[in-house]
Amino acid sequence: MAQALTNPKDDFSGWYNEIVYRADLAGQSPVRGCIIVKPYGYEIWEGLKAALDKRFKATGHQNAYFPLFIPEDYLKREAQHVEGFSPELAVVTIGGGKELEERLIVRPTSETIIGEAFSEWIQSYRDLPLLINQWANVVRWEMRTRPFLRTMEFLWQEGHTAHATEADAEAETLQMLDVYADVVINEAAIPVIKGLKSDSERFAGALRTYTIEAMMGDKRALQSGTSHNLGQNFAKAFNIQYLDEGNQRQFCWTTSWGMSWRVIGGIIMTHGDEKGLRLPPRLAPIQVVIVPIYKTPEEQSAVMAAADRLKQALVGADIRVKLDAREETPGFKFNDWEMRGVPLRLEIGPRDVQNNTVVAARRDIPGREGKSFLSQDNIAAQVAALLTHLQANMLAQAAAFRDANIHDVRSYDELKQVIEAGGFARGWWKEDSEAEARIKAETQASHRCYPLEQPGGEGVNFLTGERADRVALFAKAY
């Protein structure tokens, strides 16, 4: 019998790590700080990638690919950028057995090398906007790693665009933030809060950074995607200019935006429970598993024939289905597929064959409440409806949990109490990097964002007593 999963209420970090490996998402790597992503985990990433890519192309973006290695000089051209990334850089100093004349940086992000390309591609206002996306791996030399959430090498996409005006760049930045929120909410069933990062938390070299913030099962925050208005900083560093309609040279306004496989970690931590992973149907590699139940060879023959008919009906409706014909007990299979988070289990035994029924067990609702009998007739339509309801219910469950754990605070003591108990503290805040640093040092909570949805009016800053016209979220974060 398999060892019981650690209870997330007892050890959330240990529970998370166990799920990553026991649900067959990833394997250990011989390289410290890296992981081997197994097919089951990679299929979740492929689902996210497809959902994003479809939306990118619908908004006019094109995919391209740029080199993994970046000349060190490129990073030095934008001072804030190199300062922000220098602690995380992996540097190549030897190639072909010889010391390199110019060191190469293993891609931590691509603003610099793409900026250099943009300076060559853009000549006139007719070349704008230039909308490029790259699917790639990046390397950041992390000292404390955790699978999917923070690894030295990870997969992501990074969008890079150039525009004629600041207004166009800002519209692009916010449009892509909306795309990210759409995917994470409607595909991953994770409710997120769209917001603006504070000055001290914004991307190195950016004018403004926007974020989508999610609450995990331990009430910590997870930054799940960011979109940056880079202003003209990178355009000036890399001479990205265009001739306007009056034949005058102007610097472009650029943006960048990225989302990585850390959303997989977000799915685990938002939806998982004491039995293992819970996957939203839209991203689940296997949406339905069929478990045949029998004792005698005669029962096996009838049950397997019915199970195969069910499978073919679901495959014909483009439902991702697995028929588990392993020589294991039904109980073992139930536990195994619950660990791997399959949204819907169909159980079929001899009595179900006689009654032309099948038992449907939902992963989002435990025990008897989550079970129902379905007719084998028109099974695909019934299953599709269940999956749709299941997706919506997982989002509703996560939203209810999040909303119950966001607390309004009017004083620093109240913030400390919220952070100690777990959750998001929301309060009036006036931009103050030193005060943010103090809060982080004393409570480990960081300024997550100024939510784009604001209450309006004014209030009193919970720390300083100054008047403030925005509320901000503070929380411990991954």
Image: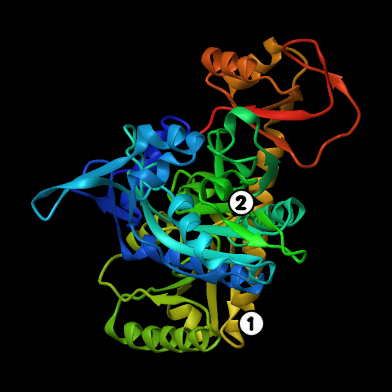
Secondary structure under tag 1 reads helix
- What separation in Å lies between label 2 and label 1 (alpha carbons)? 26 Å
- Residue 265 in the image: state x and y as whole percent: 46, 48
**What residue do we see at 55% from left, 39% from top?**
205
**What residue do we see at 69% from left, 43% from top?**
193
Query: For mark 1, what is the residue?
Result: 381
Decide which of 367, 72 is in the foreground and name it: 72
- Residue 119 versus residue 55 in the image, above or below: above
- Residue 441 in the image: state x and y as whole percent: 52, 14
- Looking at the picture, the colour scheme in use is rainbow
**What residue do we see at 74% from left, 12% from top?**
411
Front tag of 2 and 1? 2
Asked whether, in this view, residue 428 is left or right of residue 207, the answer is right
Q: Among all residues in the image, which is located at the extreme left?
A: 97
Q: Amino acid at mark 1?
A: Ala
Q: Earlier in the sequence, mark 2 or mark 1?
A: 2
Decide which of 449, 363 is in the foreground and name it: 449
Secondary structure under tag 2 reads loop
Labelled pair 2, 1 in contact (Cβ < 8 Å): no
Look at the image and tell me whether residue 366 can be seen: no
- How many residues crowd mark 1 within 10 Å: few (<14), some (14–19), many (20+)? few
Look at the image and tell me whether residue 474 can be seen: yes
Count of marks, rendered view: 2
Asked whether, in this view, residue 323 is left or right of residue 463, the answer is left
Query: For mark 2, what is the residue?
Result: 190
**What residue do we see at 58% from left, 83% from top?**
379
- Residue 462 in the image: state x and y as whole percent: 75, 15
Q: Amino acid at mark 2?
A: Ile
